[in-house]
Structure formats: C-alpha cells, structure tokens
Image: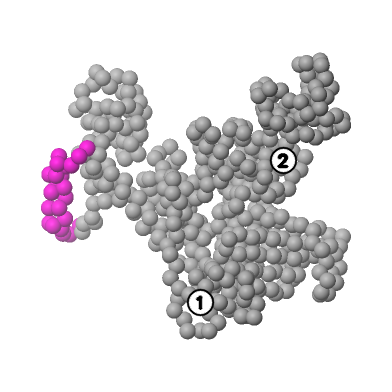
Amino acid sequence: MNQAWVFGDTDASLPSELLLQILSYLDAVSLLCAGCVNRRFYHLANDNFIWIRIFSTAFSPKRSNWKVNSVEKTAMSMKLLSVGDKEAGYWKKEYITKQIASVKAALARILKPLHPYTGLPIKTKEALRMSGLGWVIILKGNSGEEYIMEHVDLSINDSSVTAVWYGRDWPRLATLSTLDLCGVTPVFMDRSKTPTKNGPRWQSLIARFNLSHLARSPELGCDGRIRTFCLPPGLVVGLWKMPGLWLTCSSRRPLEKGSFRPGHLPPRQGRCARGRFLCSPASCCPTCRCVGLETNSSHRVCQREEELAFVMANLHFHHLVERSTFGSAAVPYELPPHTPVLDDSPERGLRGYQLHVDMHSGGVFCLCGTFRNLFTSKGVCQNFFHTNFGHFLRFLNCSIMDLTLLEEYGKPFWCFSSPVRMRASPVPRHGPPFPGETYRVEHADAEGRVHVQLVRIPHSSEYFIVSLALYLPVAKVNRWFGTDY
C-alpha cells in the first residue's frame, strides 16, 4: 500500500501496464486504498483482470484432491473469457457484494442458538469478535461538517454493550445539530487476522439524536463538574460545567435595566450572584466562548458555554448485530415483521411471561434476576397490562438497567438498555410499613413501563426491592398475539 502512495507523485512517468503489474500484487484492501490516490489510480484499480483473480481465489469452489470437477473448471474459464465484455469495476463490485453476503451468512449461523433464559443469542460475544464490529458517533454541525469519533472504551455485559467516547477534541456543542450512532464493520473479513480499522468499513445507522435541545432533555444527575442527560434510547451525554467569569465592562456608563446591545436577541432577565440585574443576550463571546451577561454596573458577567465531556451508548443484545451491520449509513436496519402465532387459548398474551433484568454501574453488577410465570388478568386489561410481585433482592445503587421480557413462546417481547435514576418516593398508604426510606426506579418508552420500588436499609448504603411492576400497552399485545383485548 505504501508503494501506491510513493508512485502517486511519479505516476505520470510510468506506463499503465507497469502500474497494473504492480497493483496485481496487492490484496483487496490495499487495492481499494490505492484507488483513492488519484483519478488515474482509481481507474487502474478497477481493472477486471485483477479483481476476477481476487474473486476466484476467495470464492473458488472446493475441489477434491482425487478428482477435478470439469464443469466447475469450464465455468471458471468462461468467466475469464468474459472479463473484457464487462464494464470496468464489475468484478470489484461482485467481490464486495459477495464478501458482505458471506459475512451476513456467517453471523446468522453464529447467532442462531438462543439462550433458554434470556431468549437472546448465546454466541453474541463471539459474533462481535468475529465480525470486528465497533461503534462510532458522527457529530454533524449546523453547516454540514461531520466529525467521526471512535469509541474509546467498550465493555460487554451479560445482555448489553456499553460504548464510551471521551477526549479533548470535541467540537463546540453550540455548532452541532445531530449525533448519529453507527455500527462499523470491516467490509473484508479474514478470520485468521485481527480486524483492522485502516481498511474499508461498512457503516450501519442505529439511531439519530437531536443535540439542539440537549439542555432540555431529562437530567440524570450532576456533580461539581459534569451534568448528565439522557437521550432515548439509551444514550447518556455529559456536559462540563463551566464557571462564570467577572470582566470589566467596555463601557463605564451603567446600563439601563433591561437594555442589551444592538444585534442581540431580547434578553432573559435575572440576577447575578451579587444581586445585580442581569441581561443575558443570546450571543457568544468570541474570546472565551461564553455568553455575555450585562449588569447595571460597570461589570460584565461571562457565563461559559457547557461543552461535551463524554458520550455513553447502552446497546441491548436483542438484534444488536443485525442493527449494527445490516443497515446503511443513512437508513437503519428494519426488523422483520412479526407474524402472530395462531393459538386458540382464550388467555394468550396474558400469561407465561418471563423477565430477566440486570442492573450495573461501572462494570459492577448490582442485580441479576430472572422471574418466571408472570401473568395478568382480563379484569385489569384496560390501558395497560400490569404484573406486580413482591421479591426481596439485595443490591447497591446503580444506573444502567438491562431488561429482557419474553412472551409465553420464548420470543423477546420488550428489550431495552437504558440509564435509570433513583428518586425518593412517598410511603404508600396501603401496605406494610417499611423500616427505611423508600425510593423508586422507573423507565418508560413506547414499548412499556417498568416501576421498581426500593427500601433503604437503615445505617447502610444498600437497598431491597420490595415491588417490581411491568405495564405493557394493550395495543402492542393485540398486534403481537392477534388478539382484541
């Protein structure tokens, strides 16, 4: 590959026949990279005679050592004779298409066996290693520019993957519009070699997030330096807290109450830490990247903009490999339509649910439990299905919940991996008194809602789960089972 770049400066003095001879010694990855040098190398790297040789080597049928199949040999000879009749780059496209198809077929075979408890593929971790799958975020600016960032840290849990991005080279948050979460896989997979990030890779869009109203999203928590926000499904964004600065105002004349500089939007009134009246124009200081706040004295408050600190994506195993490999850079993978199971049972969709829930934080698992034979009755089937049961489990405070709900036929019905926040909860009026403070953990999306009630053990930092309730939309149950509740 380095030879192609060296010849890029002197390719005008070399004949095409000599360059083709040199390119014929390259593998598929290096040949594609060589085609990016300039226009001449692009056309030379599309040579059909080079690519059909690579195609035949990679996908030639297996022959017995004792007998050569004459039909296969004749078919390969006919392909070689028809090379000149094809347009330039035809066999390159054929090779790439068949490589992608072979990767999909290999992944489908690995993901076929399912776990009896979770209903998820048993060999998901093996599929991730074999395919070289990784994840990137693409930050898109308001002016159309793009910033691609590779994940810095990756942890594989029992039923989810957590990818983290952090660093110092973040673009300004005020200039960003959207964030695309994409899976990336090498186009050419060689099981005998470790996947590399330098070769051509395929992008598959998983989710797109709007960053223009990030500060209005639900806040998970904060400390002295960082505020964290949740963008469904399962994305956590951390923002640095930037302290305000007091600067001398350029004008010694005190500003009138409610005034603002020309060209600024109408101010938002408030008071600063010193009790002075503030006007906050919707502008940014070009020197310190802060928002200027004018006061009615000879001072000016500069409140720095919050900037990105980290991004964390929580991805559930359910169809994770398919969503990360089978989509395109612009369109996410569409799940195959579900076909309802024909069953004459009058209570299908009401019984036989199985729940598996994990709660973890920082790689430490706080809860890992499986609950079987969950059910509800038609009497409470109005807006939501409700399943409530008491179960005492001991775990520490945690932030990520991985939930997998299987229906009575063992297929995943509702799956998610999302950050959750523990909040104080009032003591219920009905029920036994609890010895400590009560808390709740909730998560809700379009597929359902889960509510966990906890009690803190006195003189301890541990909690007990005393109640866990699931609420499933009746409309989804009807679509899944073909019922009419």
Q: Secondary structure at mark 2?
A: strand
State the residue in front, 151 or 19: 151
416, above or below 388, in the image: above
State the residue in front, 472 or 315: 472
Q: Residue at coordinates 83% horizontally, 33% vertically from top-left?
A: 271
Query: Would you say residue 343 is visible in this rendering?
Result: yes
Image check: 261 left or right of 276? left
Where is residue 280? Give x, y as percent. 74, 30
Q: Nearer the viewer, mark 1 or mark 2?
A: 1
Alpha-carbon neighbours of circle 2 within 10 Å: few (<14), some, or many (≥20)? some
**Three-letter code for the amino acid on which mark 2 is drawn:** Ile
Image check: 47 left or right of 304? left
Q: Residue at coordinates 73% horizontally, 31% vertically from top-left?
A: 267
Quadrant placement of the N terminus: top left
Where is residue 77? Give x, y as percent. 13, 48
The residue singled out by tag 1 in the image is 483
**Quadrant in the picture for residue 339:** bottom left
State the residue in front, 402 or 461: 402
Where is residue 343? Give x, y as percent. 46, 81
Query: Would you say residue 133 is visible in this rendering?
Result: no
Q: Residue at coordinates 68% horizontally, 49% vertically from top-left?
A: 218
Where is residue 190? Give x, y as percent. 37, 47
Q: Residue at coordinates 44% horizontally, 41% vertically from top-left?
A: 196
Image check: 455 left or right of 446? right
12, above or below 410, in the image: above
Queried whether the magenta region covers residue 146, the answer comes back as: no
Quadrant placement of the C terminus: bottom right
Q: Which residues are magenta?
A: 65-88
**Three-letter code for the amino acid on which mark 1 is drawn:** Thr
The residue singled out by tag 2 in the image is 226
Most common secondary structure along the magenta stretch: helix
